[in-house]
Amino acid sequence: MSKTWRIAGIDFEHFHMGDNLRMAFEHPNVEIVGICDESVEKMQQSIENFGISPDAVFTDYRACIEATRPDIVLLCPATGRHAEAVEEIAPFGTHIIMEKPFASSLAEADRMTAAMGEDQRLAINWPLAWYPPHITAKRLIDEGQIGEVLEVHFYDGNRGPLWHLADKVETTAEEVEAGKPHSWFYKAALGGGSLLDYLGYGTTLGTWYQGGRAPLEVTSMIHVPKGLEVDEHSITVARYAHGLSKFETRWGTFTDPWTHQPQPKCGFVIVGSEGTISNYDWDSTVRLQSREHPEGTDLAVDSIDAPFQNPIQYVVHCLENELPIEGPLAPDICRVGQQIVDTAFQSAQEGRSLSLIGA
């Protein structure tokens, strides 16, 4: 008989909690045993969506864990609270799935891994890691279809974090503007801004595509609109021993990529010694350019089956089979991504190129 994995969702500051709880709700071997946030209002949509009983709703994380005894805790705090949240939860011995990004600094990321026990798993969930175009691109790279990866070009974002709720439910322009002064996404002290929100996607999957290689130097610029304290646009250039890669983040794309791809298109272009791949978010094909077909070929994306469709499936699979967390969810790959993010953030503040932090 398969084990039923007990999952609790703690901290609803990031609206992705609703998406992750849905994945848990739909998993045949998972039971949502509790949810917790200081604000019951933030949990209301999930309470209704998943039929969560009042005795499984908590406002104190200690009471939640002690009463529900979860195997896995889903965490969705503000970026600036990731280390604190892991240090609170890890002593209870649970496995943790932390919603992206890894942390708001390399020091905080290292605190997170240090807090975990030897038998505990920590996974950092990047929703882009489950997109078939990006998984297909990695398979093509691993097969040697484009030779050695020399460049990764990343452009991604959306209209802004307040334009949608869980399950991509849209809000209005009036709600967005009214929400900015109160949202952690727009507060520097809590890790707000498009750079800290989205750059880790590109640098973490980019590190995955690069086979774990780290850059030597990073240069970044940001744009902070008048009246805000965080950026809505950043461009980062990373210099590797073998070449340059570029990572661009944008809150304020003309359209959301899951509705209509904006221009520039959100996703990746990967340049290798023997070819190129373009793999854009939500697309049903990737484009492969090779020596044999320099004109380029559109390939259907791979069909992704369970347990590789979402973080709940994957982490449960790893636990059931005593496997390590690998790929973009693995702390070692995420740490390189965080090094680039840290260096980019500092570079933008100082207005100059910097050697990779923590190298």
Image: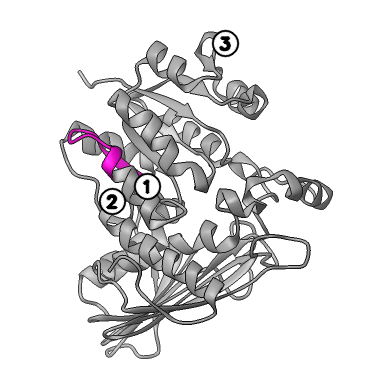
Residue 52, image x, y percentages: 54, 17
Q: Is residue 118 magenta?
A: yes
Give the magenta range: 114-124
What's the residue at 56%, 19% (across, down)?
59
Mark 2 in CB contact with mark 1 (< 8 angstroms): yes
Label 1 element class = strand
Kindly identify which residue carries mark 1.
124
Q: Amino acid at mark 1?
A: Ile
Q: Amino acid at mark 3?
A: Pro
Kindly identify which residue carries mark 3.
54
Label 3 element class = helix
What's the residue at 41%, 42% (across, down)?
83
Task: Pick out the residue farthest to the front.
Answer: 350
Residue 287, image x, y percentages: 41, 76
Quarter in which the N terminus is drawn: top left
Vertical side of 322 occupied by 50: above or below:
above
